[in-house]
Amino acid sequence: MDIETLRSICTAYPGVTEDIKWGNDLCFQVGGKMFCVTSLQPPLQISFKVPDEEFDELSTSESIIPAPYAARFKWILVQDPALFKKKQWEHYIAQSYQLVKAKLPKKLQARLK
């Protein structure tokens, strides 16, 4: 996984915007809410939201930790992007997008279809 592949996956969804936050993190957002964050500087690390029932299992896996400052919202930090194949990345990013989108106001969700 590299930043360009991650960008192509994340920006394929309706209403996605990008922003640089905290000086060196590329954030992908839907409706102004983040659903994926990656470091712009090596080593590449990627954070995203997961369902409550997957959080404990994933966050105790090798090279995955609870995301700093966001773990209480069920975000994980993948420290080694090679841990997942592209199809797995597509699954987790789509899942994170859907989880975040589901929390947006209904009117905004309707506009994102």
Image (spheres, rainbow, N blue to C red):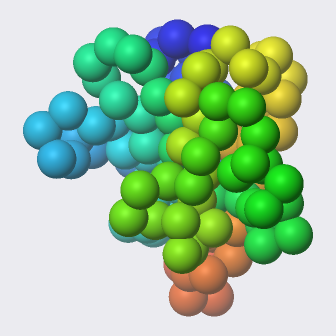
Residue 88 in picture, x, y percent from top left: 83, 29
Query: Foreground: 72 or 26?
Result: 72
- List the single residue furthest toward the bottom: 106
In this rendering, is residue 95 above or below 53? above
Residue 49, quarter of picture? bottom right
Q: Residue at 33% across / 13% down in the picture?
A: 42
Q: Position of residue 12 (x, y in %)?
A: 62, 34
The answer to which quarter of the image holds residue 106 is bottom right
State which quarter of the image contains the C terminus: bottom right
Near-viewer residue (60 or 27): 60
Judge by depth and name the residue closer to the eye, 81 or 68: 68
Residue at the location (50% across, 53% down)?
A: 67
Above or below, 29 relative to 85: below
Q: Residue at x 21, y 47 (%)?
A: 21
- Pick the front one: 80 or 105: 80
Q: Quadrant of the N terminus?
A: top right
Residue 39 as seen in the image, left or right of residue 110:
left
Expressed as whole percent of the image width and height from the top left, the position of residue 79 reads: 54, 29
Q: Position of residue 16 (x, y in %)?
A: 49, 48
Could you tell whether 95 is left or right of 97 in the image?
A: right
Residue at position x 56%, y 88% in the image = 105
